[in-house]
Image (tube, rainbow, N blue to C red):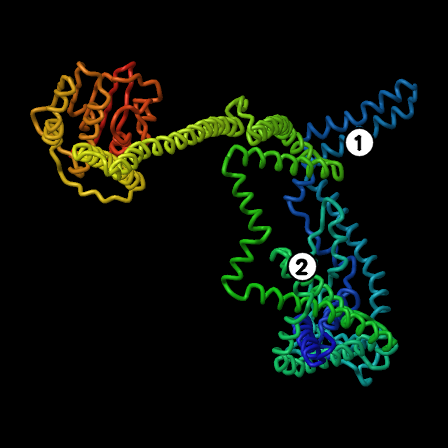
């Protein structure tokens, strides 16, 4: 930082400009274009002198004058009379006060004391009765109290006047009462004055006869004396001065010298601040470049932005305090030793400059960090307060938990605060609040601890689940949010168990798929290879050659069918196939598709029983694909239905308005596996795989159903095999 003095000096100039603005905002109005005698301190002193010279020197009233103005009103009489209650209440109260004392005197055989107490009691009761019987009696008592207040005030005025004259002996005055013509003099007003003020008839000095500083004397008793009825004003013309000689003797010019010194200092600060502002503006780019190049910047950049802002605010507070200390060192330090004074001020200004430099360095670094909207958003979202706000928001994802937390914190806070207030100051209200908080907080704390224990149990069971121990449920207790969470964990455990079962099943089916594909592809391929080798023999007869070619043709068709079906079901399963939907009459489609296989069914010794409605049933389907679906189901019957049994094909409209197509037959082979697995590719009811076919018939049918958003299910009851397809009608 010290390698380049110019940006450093520009930064110091900026700090000096800001300090100048700071001092100008605080005291500029006091020093710009004013002298000491226009300052607030002197004006306050002048106002005090003007207000007190009247009642203490010029317009001092006599006791008789004030007493003659006293008036006792009827309301005051009534107030005095009923101050302690009604007549009966006051008499009973006096009797009760004396009764115990008289009884004690009787028990001690103190006859004289008893007589004295009874006499006092009777006199007091007589006075009370007189209060209620005679207004004049009450008026005299009130008047006596007010006269006593006047006497106390006059006595206090005499003492205060001596102090006033002694403390203000540097003032000289010559003032004439405009009404009486009486002149009052003190000192020599013709002497060369440091300050002089003249009063004339147009602008006289108006003074009171009652001192504001002593007026509280009139309110010391229950029957206070209203000073407004006693106040009088008098106007004076003349001169009031402070001579230089008397001011020096009274050290008043010390204040004058202090004011002048401060004025010169502030003028220097403000004028140099203007020059510094020009230099700071010219060097602003060098300052920014210097600050941005500091290595220490990296340490703050690594912090979250709210920490950096917090440090900046702390530094700003210290900066403000340091500015206030430096200002007070200039404004309020009174030292006759100028070397000590300026040394103290310069040290505090030096500390201020160092603190201010740290502040502005941090401020520039913070600005560079958030000088674009994108940077600001990124830093805010990465801040601790943002994450804390998210945590607080998460607290109210479940209102019950959020409410419990607020009740616990509120009870602890208000209960603890009230307890501290009760211990420090006492009183019933903090104790009451503590009791209420305890009534709410203790049950809440018990409930909270119980819930925390339950939470620990749930966390332990969750850990067991994470480690693969899924053999027991998480205990569900009550209907709290934690119980709801435990129930969700149980559902999750069941889902994990099901998923693991499905995964194992998937792995098994995948293995079987590979085995089945290999078997079904290898069988015709082996035949093709075998008969191809036989054809290579030149010694075979023409009849044998034709027979081998026929077998090769059959096996090639078989292999082609397998591969085409596999590609088709793969495309359908991936959704990579386009449907050409139209409004199709399912009744006619089923009639035609099944009719093509009537001869085949008869040759297979299967008795077809088809049921269909007389009226058309329409659906929005791809007619070609839906034909393939029906054809696959009928072909499946031809392969696996038991000879000599009936085959039922049904098409109907359900109560829900869907079209339902059903194919039902008795299986030739035992269906020992899960019926849902028959939808898998290359899966056959014939586990030994002696039948012809690709094993993809039901898989293709299921894919066609899925593409149309329809539903297909298989029901197996012993050897009874049933396929049901449902699709919405149009």
Quadrant placement of the N terminus? bottom right
Q: Residue at x 92, y 22 (%)?
A: 110
| Marker disc for residue 173 | none
Quadrant placement of the C terminus? top left
In screen coordinates, is 454 left or right of 167? left
Q: Residue at x 68, y 82 (%)?
A: 271
Q: Residue at x 24, y 37 (%)?
A: 535
Along the viewing direction, whichever of 392 and 730 lies nearer the viewer: 730
To which quarter of the image does residue 558 belong? Answer: top left
Residue 635 in sight from this viewpoint: yes
Along the viewing direction, whichever of 332 and 321 lies nearer the viewer: 321
Residue 703 in sight from this viewpoint: no
Along the viewing direction, whichever of 206 and 261 lies nearer the viewer: 261
To which quarter of the image does residue 707 belong? Answer: top left
In screen coordinates, is 319 left or right of 668? right
Q: Which residue is mark 2?
A: 311
Most distant residue in the front direction? 539
Of callouts 1 and 2, the N-terminal one: 1
In screen coordinates, is 135 left or right of 454? right
The image shows residue 170, relative to residue 370, as above or below, that is below
Along the viewing direction, whichever of 129 and 434 lies nearer the viewer: 434
Most distant residue in the left direction? 614
Q: Where's residue 582, x and y in %?
A: 14, 40
The image shows residue 455, relative to residue 716, as above or below, that is below
Q: Badge 1: how crowded within 10 Å, few (<14), some, or many (20+)?
A: few
| Marker disc for residue 123 | 1
Disc 1 to disc 2, C-alpha distance: 79 Å
Q: Where's residue 240, x and y in %?
A: 76, 77
Q: Badge 2: how crowded within 10 Å, few (<14), some, or many (20+)?
A: some
- Front tag of 1 and 2: 2
In screen coordinates, is 279 left or right of 639? right
């Amino acid at each position: 930082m010290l390698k380049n003095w110019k940006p450093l000096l520009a930064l110091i100039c900026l700090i000096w400009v800001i300090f100048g603005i700071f001092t100008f905002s605080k005291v500029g109005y006091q020093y710009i274009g004013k002298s000491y005698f226009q300052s607030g301190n002197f004006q306050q002193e002048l106002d005090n002198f003007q207000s007190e010279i009247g009642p203490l020197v010029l317009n001092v009233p006599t006791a008789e004058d004030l007493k003659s103005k006293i008036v006792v009103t009827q309301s005051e009489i009534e107030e005095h009379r009923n101050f302690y209650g009604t007549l009966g209440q006051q008499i009973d109260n006096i009797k009760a006060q004396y009764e115990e004392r008289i009884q004690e005197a009787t028990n001690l055989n103190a006859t004289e004391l008893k007589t004295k107490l009874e006499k006092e009691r009777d006199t007091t009761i007589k006075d009370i009765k007189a209060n209620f019987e005679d207004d004049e009696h009450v008026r005299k008592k009130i008047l006596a109290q007010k006269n006593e207040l006047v006497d106390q005030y006059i006595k206090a005025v005499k003492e205060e006047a001596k102090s006033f004259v002694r403390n203000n002996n540097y003032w000289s005055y010559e003032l004439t009462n405009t009404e009486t013509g009486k002149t009052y003099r003190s000192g020599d007003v013709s002497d060369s004055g440091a300050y002089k003020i003249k009063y004339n008839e147009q602008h006289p000095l108006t003074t009171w006869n009652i001192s504001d500083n002593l007026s509280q004397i009139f309110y010391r008793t229950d029957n206070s004396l209203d000073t407004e009825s006693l106040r009088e004003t008098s106007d004076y013309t003349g001169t009031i001065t402070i001579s230089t000689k008397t001011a020096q003797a009274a050290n008043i010019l010390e204040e004058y010298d202090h004011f002048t010194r401060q004025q010169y200092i502030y003028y220097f600060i403000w004028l140099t601040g203007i020059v510094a502002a020009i230099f700071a503006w010219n060097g602003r780019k060098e300052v920014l470049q210097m600050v941005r190049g500091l290595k220490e910047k990296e340490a703050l950049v690594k912090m979250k932005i709210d920490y950096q802002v917090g440090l900046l605010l702390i530094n700003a507070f210290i900066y403000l305090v340091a500015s206030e200390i430096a200002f007070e060192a200039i404004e309020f330090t009174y030292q006759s030793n100028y070397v000590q004074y300026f040394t103290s001020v310069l040290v505090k200004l030096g500390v201020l400059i160092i603190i201010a430099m740290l502040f502005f360095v941090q401020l520039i670094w913070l600005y560079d960090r958030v000088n674009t909207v994108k940077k600001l958003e990124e830093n805010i979202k990465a801040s601790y307060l943002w994450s804390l706000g998210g945590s607080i928001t998460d607290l109210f994802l479940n209102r019950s938990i959020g409410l419990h937390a607020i009740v616990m914190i509120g009870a602890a806070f208000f209960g603890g605060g009230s307890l501290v207030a009760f211990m420090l100051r006492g009183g019933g209200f903090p104790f009451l609040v503590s009791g209420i908080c305890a009534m709410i907080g203790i049950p809440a704390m018990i409930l909270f601890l119980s819930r925390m224990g339950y939470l620990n149990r749930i966390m332990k069971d969750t850990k067991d689940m994470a480690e693969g121990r899924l053999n027991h449920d998480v205990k569900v207790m009550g209907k709290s949010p934690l119980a709801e969470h435990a129930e969700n964990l149980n559902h999750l455990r069941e889902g994990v168990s099901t998923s693991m079962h499905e995964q194992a099943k998937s792995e098994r089916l995948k293995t079987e798929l590979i085995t089945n594909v290999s078997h079904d592809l290898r069988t015709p391929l082996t035949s093709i290879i075998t008969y191809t080798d036989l054809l290579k023999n030149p010694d075979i007869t023409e009849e044998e050659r034709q027979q081998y070619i026929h077998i090769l043709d059959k096996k090639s068709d078989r292999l082609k069918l397998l591969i085409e079906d596999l590609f088709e079901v793969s495309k359908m399963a991936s959704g990579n196939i386009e449907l050409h939907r139209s409004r199709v009459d399912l009744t006619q489609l089923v009639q035609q598709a099944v009719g093509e296989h009537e001869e085949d069914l008869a040759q297979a010794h299967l008795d077809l029983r088809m049921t269909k409605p007389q009226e058309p049933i329409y659906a929005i389907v791809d007619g070609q694909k839906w034909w393939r679906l029906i054809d696959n189901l009928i072909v499946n019957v031809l392969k696996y239905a038991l000879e000599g049994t009936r085959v039922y094909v049904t098409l109907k409209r359900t109560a829900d308005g869907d079209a339902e197509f059903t194919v039902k037959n008795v299986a030739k082979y035992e269906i020992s596996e899960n019926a849902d697995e028959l939808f898998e590719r290359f899966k056959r009811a014939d586990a030994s795989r002696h039948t012809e076919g690709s094993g993809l018939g039901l898989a293709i049918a299921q894919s066609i159903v899925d593409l149309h958003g329809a539903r297909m299910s298989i029901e197996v009851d012993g050897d009874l095999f049933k396929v049901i397809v449902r699709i919405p009608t149009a």
